[in-house]
Image: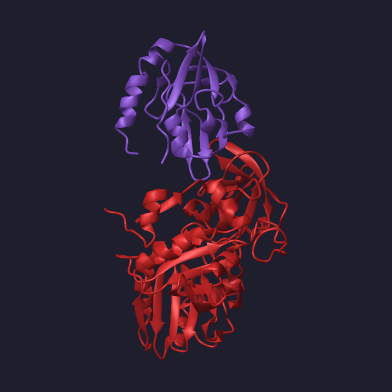
Chain colours: A purple, B red
Amino acid sequence: MTDEVKVETGLYYTSEHEWAKPAGDIVVIGISDYAQAQLHEIVYVELPKKDASISQGEAVGAVESVKAVSDFFSPVTGTVVEVNEALLDSPEKINGDPYGEGWIAKVKPSNWEANASRLMDAEKYKQHLATLKH
Amino acid sequence: MELKKTHIYQYHAEHGNVVDFGGYAMPVWYEGIIAEHTAVREACGIFDTSHMGRVYAEGPDVVKFLDYVDTNDIASLTDGKGIYGNMCKPDGGIVDDLIVYRMSAEKFLVVYNAGNRAKDFAWLQKNTKGFKVKLTDMSDKIGMIAVQGPKAMDILAKISTPDPATIERFNIASLKISGLDCLAARTGYTGEDGFEVFVLDDPVTDPVKSLKVWNDLIAAGAKPCGLGARDSLRLEAGLWLYGNDIDETTNPIEAGLKWVVKMKKPSYFNGRRALEGIIEKGVTRTLVGIELTERGIPRHGYEVYDGEKKIGAVTSGGVAPTLDKSIALAYLPLEYKEPGKEVQIKIRSNLVKGKIVKHHPFYDETKYGWKRVKA
């Protein structure tokens, strides 16, 4: 029913379908194309709180469709430096561009190397998706 | 366990996003919940409701029997008329809500919720004791399709004889639809005008007739809709969902369903004494509508607060696509029933502000729903 799921190279993924993308001294985080397709029509995003200290694996927000709520687990430990407030009025940006305009927050990581070692690269994430029922 | 399949399953498998809904393989959406919701409010959508329970009750005591199990006034029905009511336990708790149609003096069609099919049939059967009445479960022998929206009449008329316009609200009549023997009732679960069509003599093991009616309705301009839109539409209309807003621990009086409990009926019915007691003492809580005034989506089970004090829980909640707002139903103490009263709903760790609003329906009835002024 849906087009092939996009997995962007250069990003790091969780088994819960969040992504993290290092960019200079910060890490941008969001949810994967697979996650947005599963939710379909996203109608609300609860963003992490700016300046909050967050931990890898912690529920720091939520992404919701009409029918479903999906917790957003941070793929990285650190301090939230910016949140994507555009999503409050246009949550559908996550459906349209999950790796770009649909980013959720920017985090200053406290130990990115340690976080990254617990995440999957694009190849591993593709293998993970292949194990899931569609 | 393998999921049960309805009459329209073949279409769902090919076009829908199918999930396990109470043991049935049902579509949550085909194109998307919002587009399907909007189609029903603005034009016409169709829903497979073949998972619902459909029973013929027949016999010389059928009216007495139904008046014993149903809170509403079955004896008042004439041929071709239906009525919405509740079945209650002796303590007043709701076994299910249902619609009963009088086909003839000794034959009625009883329609109830999919999730309660086994429970309700057993309950009805148990209550036949002492009545000359026979029950036949027709659920797997009759297809059921809801045709809903301001254009439902026009679209159904394209494939029906005689014209369904002669069927008044809550009435049922025989029609040829797609040339096939059907019943059409002017009822639904969306708040809109429309019909619930019963495709007769169509076994679920080979449901060619129901699929033909379904496909002909689509060709006539109806949009196939899934359970997602069915839920958002009924919530906007303030219609009760069994298992969420009513169940065996709630009674019709606190649920705002006193209007289907007919104490003027001469005889005893299940729950009568308990409900008389509840009315006399007065209820302590009542089902209210809440509209959020801040961002967030309330869901079933979320707690409702007045400041620090927990005052109840959401029974149904979600986004209302027509209103572009978040709305909820909740049982709250009586002092919270007045529109305008402020409350908060706990959504994850946040207390999100809302206010009490009228909820049956939530929308403006001059603009939406079956009472609207037609343009």
> Quadrant where the C terminus of chain A lies?
top left
- Residue B19 visible in the picture: no
Q: Closer to the camera, B298 or A125?
A: A125
Q: Closer to the camera, B243 or B263?
A: B243
Q: Residue A13's spot in the image, x, y percent? A: 40, 22
Q: Residue A105's spot in the image, x, y percent? A: 55, 22
> Quadrant where the N terminus of chain A lies?
top left
- Residue A21 visible in the picture: yes
Q: How many marks?
A: 0
Relative to A73, is B49 above or below?
Answer: below
| Quadrant of the rendered image containing residue A48 | top right
- Of all residues shown, which one is farthest toward the top? A24
Q: Residue at x 40, y 74 (%)?
A: B200
Q: Relative to residue B66, is residue B264 drawn left or right?
A: right
Relative to B221, is B275 above or below?
Answer: below
Q: Residue at x 27, y 54 (%)?
A: B2
Q: Closer to the camera, A18 or B229?
A: B229
Q: Relative to residue A40, is residue B149 drawn left or right?
A: right
| Quadrant of the rendered image containing residue B285 | bottom right
